[in-house]
Amino acid sequence: MRRVERNEILGLGDYEAIRPQFRARVIEEKKRRRFAVGPHATVVLENHDTVLMQIQEMLRTERITKEAAIQHEIDVYNELVPNPGEISCTLMFEISDKDERDAFLSRAKDAEKNMSLAVRGAKHPVQWDRAREIPDRTSAVHYLKIPLSEDAIAAIRGGEPIEFVVEHPAYSHTAALAREIIASIIEDLG
């Protein structure tokens, strides 16, 4: 999948002019790329457009205009764009009450080490950003990559069911992916 390039990034004024339409389009796209895994986890499949919006929004929020800082944001967020043969996603544990969320994140320490994508019964473990690990808890937000074998890719393209699995004592849930989500994965795999 194509990474975001510098020439795609609009200046703050130009972005403000198109922001409502651009955000509406990408938010609508994200709706068909989002699924729940149990009551507290949401996964969004990342692609070029979701990353482009994240970069533009970060530049806007932080009022970033220096060229080196813009390139830094592009480089950081381009890590979310899937490489060939892999899926890229963001998993968020969403609990609104701060105390309840903090307690859950402590109980769910290492949850990211217990996540996978199951295709034809074979589990493909996620890879996570080890630099974002927290010693005594899991993070509320995980940036994940899921490398797939050629057999798994063929099975996905052939319409086999797919499940996202979290198998942790504090949070054990499986989500059977809907046809629309699988279509997004096939699109991302090219």
Image (cartoon, rainbow, N blue to C red):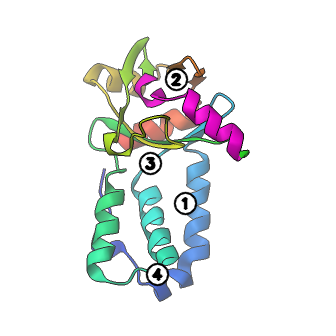
Q: Per the image, is 104 magenta?
A: yes
93 or 82: nearer the eye? 93
Quadrant of the drawing holding the C terminus: top left
Tags 2 and 3 touching, CB below 8 Å: no
Question: Is label 2 in a helix, a strand or a loop?
Answer: strand
Tags 1 and 2 touching, CB below 8 Å: no
Residue 180, given in percent of the width and then of the height, sits at: 57, 37
N-terminal of the pair, mark 4 or mark 2, is 4
The stretch of residues the image draws in magenta is 98-116
Q: CA distance from mark 1 to mark 4?
A: 21 Å
| The residue positioned farthest toward the right in the image shown | 97
Amino acid carrying mark 4 in the image: Arg
| The residue positioned farthest toward the front in the image shown | 136
N-terminal of the pair, mark 1 or mark 2, is 1
Crowd band around label 3 with a 10 angstrom C-alpha radius: few (<14), some (14–19), many (20+)? many
The residue that mark 2 highlights is 166
Mark number displayed over residue 46: 3
The residue that mark 1 highlights is 26
The reply to whether residue 169 is in sight is: yes
Q: CA distance from mark 4 to mark 2?
A: 37 Å
Residue at (56% x, 76% y) in the render: 19
Q: Indicate which label's residue lies in the foreground, 1 or 2.
A: 2
Residue at (61% x, 74% y) in the render: 20
The residue that mark 4 highlights is 63
N-terminal of the pair, mark 1 or mark 4, is 1
Crowd band around label 2 with a 10 angstrom C-alpha radius: few (<14), some (14–19), many (20+)? many
Q: CA distance from mark 3 to mark 1?
A: 11 Å
